Amino acid sequence: FLVGIAAAGLVWVCASRMFEADEIPEKKPRPFQEIKGLVRNPVILAVALVRSFNQIARQVTMTFLPIYLVEHLGYADVGMGVYLTLMSVSGLVAQPVMGVLSDRLGRKAVLTPSLLALGVVYFLLQWAPPGPALALVVVAIGFLFYTVANVTTTVALDVATKESQASSFGVVSMGTHILVVPAPTLAGYLSERFGIMAAFFFPGFCLLAGACVIFPLRLRRD
């Protein structure tokens, strides 16, 4: 709570001056018409779908990876915390590096192989023994997850005009949540029916499908 209050104050102080010189448009945009146009845009729909698959992977990972580590591999709480920390640290490294590559090489050149690699990594969980091998798989998940999350958001902003960037991201987020909400329940059902690894195969297939969705698209920054 205290960190949130401090962050809000920092944003207020640092960002408030950025908007002092903004000109108020003579004609107010029609938000519902903008949203209607965005919903019909195939790139926005594809980005929403791919972002959904990535968020499904994150939800499943954060729900079932601790269960797998503690109940199936016998780790204590500290060991579980170490693996989750490794995943977050790898995301910290991935975001600036892959962001630069996305700007230089194009969105699809980063997004498509990242989706493919992330899908494969989820299947590798079943063969990764506890220790360095499993740590490497978890690090790869964190690295690639944050890459896909950031680049898909950037693609949505690339498609939008300056006046509709927030609307564009709102449409993508809405589509994402519609698909993500039932994902943990479905993963839980698969885990009970076919074993814990089925919960990880589920996002693996989703991510591979996401690569197939994004590959044929013509993106603005490619």
Image (spheres, rainbow, N blue to C red):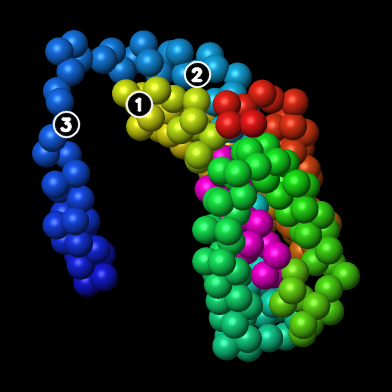
Q: Report the side of 56 relative to 209 (left or right).
A: left
Magenta region: which residues? 138-152
Q: How busy is the neighbourhood of tag 3: few (under 14 within 10 Å), some, or many (20 plus)?
A: few
Quarter of the N terminus within the rendering: bottom left
Identified by mark 3, the residue type is Asp
What amino acid is labelled 2 in the image? Answer: Val
Task: Report crowding for label 2: few under 14, some 14 to 19, many 20 or more residues within 10 A (C-alpha).
Answer: some
Residue contact at pointers 2 and 3, CB within 8 angstroms: no
Q: Earlier in the sequence, mark 2 or mark 3?
A: 3
Residue 122 seen from this side: yes
Q: Which residue is mark 3?
A: 22
Q: Are marks 2 and 1 in contact (CB under 8 Å)?
A: no
Q: Nearer the viewer, mark 2 or mark 3?
A: 3
Under tag 3, what secondary structure? loop
Q: Residue at x 66, y 23 (%)?
A: 218
Mark 1 and mark 3 residues within 8 Å of each other at the beta carbon: no
Left or right: where 54 falls relative to 71: left
Residue that mark 1 sits on: 162
Looking at this view, is 147 or 200 the one in front?
Answer: 147
Going from the N terminus, do you reach mark 1 or mark 3 first?
Answer: 3
Percent position of residue 215, x then y: 74, 32
- Which of the image's four quarters has the C terminus? top right
Identify the residue position indicated by label 2 in the image.
Answer: 39
Q: CA distance from mark 2 to mark 3?
A: 28 Å
- Position of residue 199 relative to residue 32, above or below, is below
Q: Is residue 54 left or right of residue 199?
A: left
Residue 76: x and y in percent read 63, 88
Q: Which residue: 68% across, 86% down?
A: 75
